[in-house]
């Protein structure tokens, strides 16, 4: 679960802090000026995020559509928030090549919910991604084995679709043709 610090940070101050030698092994996010130190995740969290990344990356193989990222890629959103999704996809149409750093939201963001995340925290992050330009956010709930799929709707509105184990994750207009059986992202019991 992320921990918040009390000081208000600009993106410049955030960059300076994360680049200090003593922070080399730490990970941080920036939420409306609040610094969040991202603590290590539970194995199930890492497993699901890595597996979703793997499935997206395999789908992209040889298509020249864009790049998939596993956990660890920091995105600097236009609204000033800086997030590290558990998996992400960025199209070459929006960002040709691989930049030194991303100053845009990913086309697709995947967030795997940890036990300490509150529903309000998750909704806020979804809103931030979509406000920043993300077109699909997959929010994975490991304990319940469900995924909420969020998309932008009319200005200021979001569409949410709840998927269960019998459903498929769909790339929609972001990754046409991508279809992942939801059951495939969770470990076999």
Image (cartoon, rainbow, N blue to C red):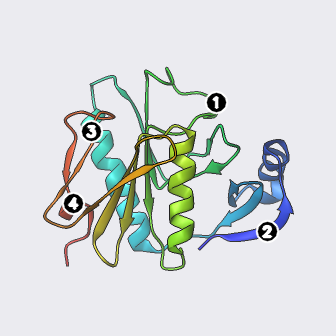
- According to the image, label 4 marks what residue? 182
Instruction: In the rendered view, tell whether residue 131 sits above or below residue 17.
Output: above
User: Label 3's element?
Assistant: loop
Q: Name which of mark 3 and mark 4 comes first in the sequence.
A: 3
User: Residue 170 in the image: x percent, y percent?
Assistant: 24, 46
Crowd band around label 2 with a 10 angstrom C-alpha radius: few (<14), some (14–19), many (20+): few
Q: Name which of mark 1 and mark 2 comes first in the sequence.
A: 2
User: Label 1's element?
Assistant: loop
Q: Which numbered disc covers residue 5?
A: 2
Crowd band around label 1 with a 10 angstrom C-alpha radius: few (<14), some (14–19), many (20+): few
Q: Quadrant of residue 173?
A: top left
- Kindly report the distance in space between the C-alpha atoms of the residues bearing marks 3 and 1: 28 Å
- Kindly report the distance in space between the C-alpha atoms of the residues bearing marks 3 and 4: 15 Å
- According to the image, label 3 marks what residue? 172
Residue at 82%, 47% (x, y): give it: 10
- Kindly report the distance in space between the C-alpha atoms of the residues bearing marks 3 and 2: 37 Å
Q: Quadrant of residue 26?
A: bottom right
Q: Name which of mark 3 and mark 1 comes first in the sequence.
A: 1
User: Label 4's element?
Assistant: helix
Instruction: In the rendered view, tell whether residue 180 sits above or below residue 177.
Output: below
- Kindly report the distance in space between the C-alpha atoms of the residues bearing marks 2 and 4: 36 Å
- According to the image, label 1 marks what residue? 100
Q: Please tell me which residue lies in front, 21 or 122.
A: 122
Q: In front of the other: label 1 or label 4? A: 4
Crowd band around label 4 with a 10 angstrom C-alpha radius: few (<14), some (14–19), many (20+): many
């Amino acid at each position: 679960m992320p921990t918040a610090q009390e000081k208000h940070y600009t993106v410049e101050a955030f960059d300076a802090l994360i680049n200090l030698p003593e922070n080399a092994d730490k990970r941080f996010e920036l939420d409306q000026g609040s610094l969040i130190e991202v603590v290590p995740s539970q194995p199930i969290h890492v497993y699901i995020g890595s597996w979703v990344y793997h499935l997206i990356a395999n789908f992209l193989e040889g298509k020249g559509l864009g790049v998939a990222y596993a956990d660890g890629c920091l995105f600097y959103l236009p609204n000033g928030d800086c997030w590290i999704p558990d998996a992400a996809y960025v199209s070459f149409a929006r960002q040709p090549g691989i930049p030194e750093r991303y100053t845009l939201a990913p086309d697709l963001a995947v967030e795997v919910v940890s036990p300490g995340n509150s529903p309000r925290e998750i909704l806020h992050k979804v809103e931030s991604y979509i406000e920043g330009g993300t077109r699909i956010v997959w929010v994975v709930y490991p304990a319940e084995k469900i995924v909420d799929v969020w998309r932008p709707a009319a200005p200021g509105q979001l569409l949410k679709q709840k998927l269960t184990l019998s459903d498929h994750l769909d790339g929609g207009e972001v990754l046409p043709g991508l279809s992942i059986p939801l059951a495939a992202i969770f470990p076999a019991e």
